[in-house]
Amino acid sequence: MKSLSEIETVSKRSSKAAGFSWGIAEEVGKNIRILELFGLGGIKNLNYYFRVRNKRNFEKLHLVSNENKTAKLEFCPIIAGLNFLDQVRSLEILNEIIFEKIAYPLLFLPFVSRASEVIGKKIQLKIDNRVFLLNYNNSIYSNSLNEGIVEVGNNVLIKFQENKDSFEENEWRELYKLSENTFVEESDSLKQDGAGAGLTDND
């Protein structure tokens, strides 16, 4: 079994060999590591993307807006992803962002996962009927793991999730009240044994 370090290094070098700059290649290496960590077929999708990339000349999306439509071929997932990650702090106010036709959209996914960490919010990513919940680049929940190669995402939707507790206020109060049973009332002896200078000074 290949290590995540090997996966990242080979993905980075192959991206450079395929024509990307070293800077972009490093980003791709990090992304394939993320995909393989969560069992999302990063190597498979990158391999197939490189096979067709020079023949298809995918469209490059530089300025991301709330609706992104391609006039010709599908969007390049790497260029679209890089620019989404770079612009995410200004994009999150849009709440929802739509892309029509992203090639090999699983290669776009790690950029969104990393963007979740940048803005400190969960992000829902929907690729046609596949739904992914990206949690601060720490975990990915999905109804579509291990599906292999996904050539095109015809309708890709990003939703920024508002940060909120998963529990009710009364549930919190109940649990907090129980936790108060561990509180210890401070006594004179505890004060003397606590941090700071004692009764004698050794200096």
Image (spheres, helix red, strand yellow):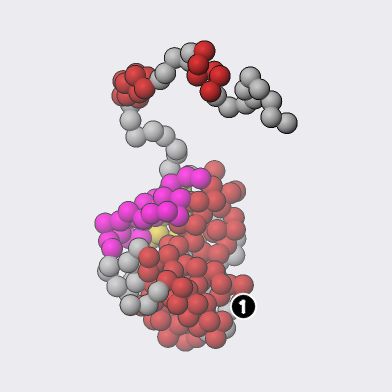
Residue 2 pos. (x, y %): 37, 77
Residue 126 drawn above or below residue 165: below
The residue shown at (31%, 21%) is 178
Local crowd size for mark 1, using a 10 Å CA cut-off: few (<14), some (14–19), many (≥20): few
Residue range of the region highlighted in magenta in the rendering? 120-145
Residue 15 drawn above or below residue 4: below
Camera-nearest residue between 27 and 92: 27
For the N terminus, give its image quadrant.
Answer: bottom left
Residue 98 drawn above or below residue 76: above
Asked which quadrant contains residue 147, the reply is bottom left
Q: Is residue 61 magenta?
A: no
Give the secondary structure at mark 1.
loop
Please, which residue is most extreme toward the right here? Answer: 203
Camera-nearest residue between 144 and 117: 117
The residue shown at (26%, 57%) is 143
Judging by the rendered image, the residue that carries numbered circle 1 is 21
Camera-nearest residue between 174 and 20: 174
